[in-house]
Image: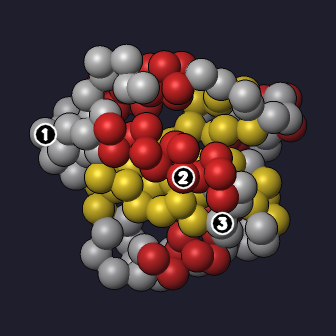
Amino acid sequence: MSQGVSLQGRTILIAEDDPLIGVLLKEMLEEAGASVAGPFPSTAAARQAMAGDMRLDAALLDVNLADGDVYPFAADLQQAGVPYALFSAAGPEHMPPVLRPRMFIQKPAPFREILAALNEMLDAVPCTTSCHEVPMGMERRTS
């Protein structure tokens, strides 16, 4: 399933509200060597899990989660320097302009495309283990 791609030593957060897709993504990433945080069905669940000292290398975010869109959470990750890919059936034209430069993966996508996107993001992050510590208590910004 992983097509020979290695994510060894990387921690990837998954935010996905469809349980089947979430489990498949988790299995695929673990098979490629990643440690996986999630899948979380909502931004609230992802934020709660990150209340400790979770270290992330990247995130794979479904745009529409159980508690609304993921954009405020994605903006927090962006501010924290954590690379992420938005994963949605809706096209990238629906993304807020400030998030458009980020990676976008159109659903449905083959696993090799998802892994390639994660590797492309991680190639720009020079570390051998988890290197991005997400600030505790990331809260929705209102500006």
Label 1 residue SS? loop
- Find the distance from the CA under tag 1 to the CA under tag 3: 29 Å
Q: Could you tell me which residue is drawn at 41 percent across and 61 percent down?
A: 37
Amino acid type, label 3: Pro
Is residue 65 positioned above or below 126 on the image? Answer: below
Is residue 38 positioned above or below 88 on the image? Answer: below
* Residue ID for mark 2: 23
Q: How crowded is mark 1: few (under 14 residues within 10 Å), some or many (20 or more)?
A: few
Q: Could you tell me which residue is drawn at 74 percent across and 49 percent down?
A: 63
Q: Residues within 10 Å of mark 2 (few under 14, many from 20)?
A: some
Label 2 residue SS? helix
Residue 53 tag number: none
Q: Total of numbered circles in the picture?
A: 3
Mark 2 or mark 1, whichever is nearer to me: 2
Q: In which quarter of the image is the N terminus?
A: top left
Residue 128 tag number: 1
Q: Which of 36 and 74 is in front in this view?
A: 36
Residue 41 tag number: 3
First in sequence: mark 2 vs mark 1:
2
The reply to whether residue 37 is visible in this rendering is yes
Mark 3 or mark 2, whichever is nearer to me: 2
Q: Nearer the viewer, residue 78 or 6?
A: 6
First in sequence: mark 3 vs mark 2:
2
Which quadrant of the figure has residue 86? top right
Q: Position of residue 84 (x, y in %)?
A: 51, 42
Q: Could you tell me which residue is drawn at 75 percent across and 38 percent down?
A: 88
Amino acid type, label 2: Val
